[in-house]
Amino acid sequence: MAGKDNEEKGLFEKIAGNEKYRKIILWIGVIGMVLIFLSGLFSPGKEKKEAPAAAEQNTSAQSYARELEASLTDLVARIQGAGEAKVLVTLERGTQQVYAQEEKKSTQTTQDQGSNNNTETNYILVKDADGSQRALAVTEMQPVVQGVVVVCSGGDNPAVQQSIIDAVTTALNITSVRVCVVKAA
């Protein structure tokens, strides 16, 4: 064992003492670091998402509206006298995220102007597993219903109209002004 340690120690001392070997090892290290850097840029597992968040929110709002329409169509069709129904739901806005934020307030007092109040608001950021940063979402607000149109065969009967309006306004927690019921052609 002692002979092997001396042999290894001798090889290390030869490399450390020789200028040519040190330059070769230095260049191998630099090339290795460049390769590691390039592999991080071109790795297929870390593709960047190019779909904007607005497109995702729009799709989410559209699917929410479709779900509401399907549910309301089923609900209205079950009301006595309504008959076959078709429902259209329009939304005021899409899904909105509410993000955590911190506020820093400072007050400066000067002789000339009195006091100045400054407020600085910053979003709280968190790091994802891949190292990217994003704002910390506290809650997600569902889209707001702008209006509902119900077309059904019993839409010309005032009693049926009132029953449909009552059902829709109760289900969606909206005012009756936002609901229109008409007879199908």
Image (tube, rainbow, N blue to C red):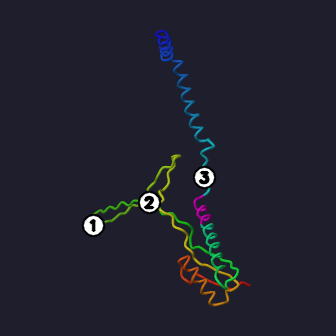
Image: magenta residue range: 52-60
The single residue placed furthest to the bottom in the displayed view is 158
Q: Name the residue type under label 3.
A: Lys
Question: Which of the two discs, 1 and 3, labels the residue nearer the N terminus?
Answer: 3
Residue under numbered circle 3:
49
Nearer to the camera, 169 or 74: 74
Q: Position of residue 161 (x, y in %)?
A: 62, 87
Residue under numbered circle 1:
112
**How busy is the neighbourhood of tag 2: few (under 14 within 10 Å), some, or many (20 plus)?**
some
Q: CA distance from mark 2 to mark 1?
A: 37 Å
Dominant SS in magenta = helix
Question: Which of the two discs, 2 and 1, labels the residue nearer the N terminus?
Answer: 2
Determine the secondary structure under disc 1: loop
Q: CA distance from mark 1 to mark 3?
A: 52 Å
Res 84 → quadrant: bottom right
Residue under numbered circle 2:
100
The single residue placed furthest to the left in the displayed view is 111
